[in-house]
Amino acid sequence: MAGLISRLYRGDINIDFVGKRKIWYGLSAFLLAISIVGLIVQQGLNLGVEFKGGSVFGFARTANSTVEQVRQTVADAGAHQIIVQQAGQKNWRVTTESLSGAEVTKVQDSISQRYGIDRNEVSSQVIGATWGGEVAQKAWVGLAVFMIAIMLYLTVAFEWRMALAAIVALVHDLVITAGVYAWSGFEVTPATMLGFLTILGYSLYDAVVVFDMIKEVTGKLGTSARMTYTEAANNALSHTLIRSLNTSLVAILPVAAILFIGTTVLGAGTLKDLSLALFVGMIVGTYSSLCVATPILVTLKEREPQWQALARRVAARQTSAAKASAAKSAGGPAKEPVSAGSQNGAVPADKRKKR
């Protein structure tokens, strides 16, 4: 294992990521299909009250209160679409559909009577659906602007094929992360949207590092090169592999701590909304930068005439080298058989000098 890690750091291991592109494409297609099915079956994402509007109640936890008891207490007051969450270790956060002023007061009275707390200690907030719709619209606009800006930057800094491959990888990461939220039923809040934008930046950073190395390696290829564009790109990817893995591991560990420790021990709902998007997105982003973005780039570049011509020249050299090696291993070309006359010292008739 130590030798394997050492070879990874030195870049001595050349993993054929590009050559196995059909496997990666199949795996990505499967994950995307599962995610889309989840979004359809679950009828979209579980949008938080900040997006769809509603009423929010907060009050201190008591020794005799559980999630089911709080939900039943609020339901007895006539509310529906009830979501009960822990807000830290000492408070409850309850969201419902939009309620009128009288209905809000009724819920506060029900909680106050059930748990023996003052009604003024039950906070309430009503968020209109219009405000939530504006938040959702701004989030989509921000995402679209981000995508366009990234497309323009990569086109100028690299080329349009790299920009297209990076955008496909970003959409790939978003859909799969959204699928995880759809199947898990986790609530999508503004913190989740921040997490989405963060993983887009992280995934893009990883892809740019790989593309920069590919540009450097393939820029040295000429007509006399002994490797194709595909081989050079795969070689560049192998050299950046350990960097990508180290970056991902260092980033995922604290996010995992926030997700599994912060949400279970501290019970912080906002941390859960943010950290789940980051945790899933970083894992998927690392996979897409290695196994999706680069293979797509190579697939596009292989169609260019210059790289097709280079591939033919490299194949011809390899064929010639293989034939020469086979002939050498066989002992060289076969010699002509020696005639009986030659064995007796006689000179063949065709070799005699004319007198």
Image (spheres, rainbow, N blue to C red):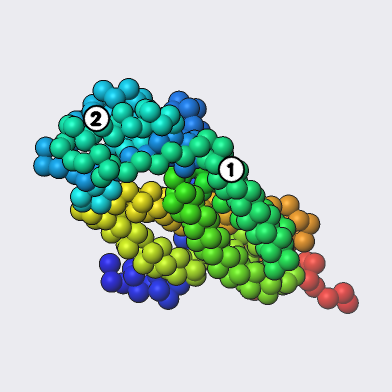
Image quarter of the C terminus:
bottom right
- The image quarter in which residue 247 lies: bottom left
Image quarter of the N terminus:
bottom left
Q: Earlier in the sequence, mark 2 or mark 1?
A: 2
- The image quarter in which residue 327 lies: bottom right
The answer to whether residue 170 is seen in the rendering is yes
Q: Is residue 174 above or below residue 230?
A: above
Residue 180 lies, in percent from the top left, at 41, 40
Q: Is residue 257 left or right of residue 346?
A: left
Along the line of sight, the residue nearer the viewer: 337 or 316 = 316
Residue depicted at x 16% and y 36%: 115
Contact, mark 2 vs mark 1 (Cβ under 8 Å): no
Q: Secondary structure at mark 1?
A: helix
Residue depicted at x 34% and y 70%: 5
Residue with the mark numbered 2 = 110
For the residues marked 2 and 1, what is the alpha-carbon distance in whole angstroms? Answer: 32 Å
Q: Is residue 118 left or right of residue 154?
A: left
Q: Is residue 170 above or below residue 63?
A: below
Along the line of sight, the residue nearer the viewer: 99 or 166 = 99
Residue with the mark numbered 1 = 134
Along the line of sight, the residue nearer the viewer: 171 or 303 = 171
Q: Point out the frontmost of discs 2 and 1.
A: 2
How packed mark 1 is, by other alpha carbons closer than 10 Å (few <14, some 14-19, many 20 or more), is some
Residue 201 lies, in percent from the top left, at 53, 60
Q: Amino acid at mark 1?
A: Glu
Residue depicted at x 49% and y 32%: 44
Residue 89 lies, in percent from the top left, at 21, 51
Along the line of sight, the residue nearer the viewer: 86 or 19 = 86
Q: Secondary structure at mark 2?
A: helix
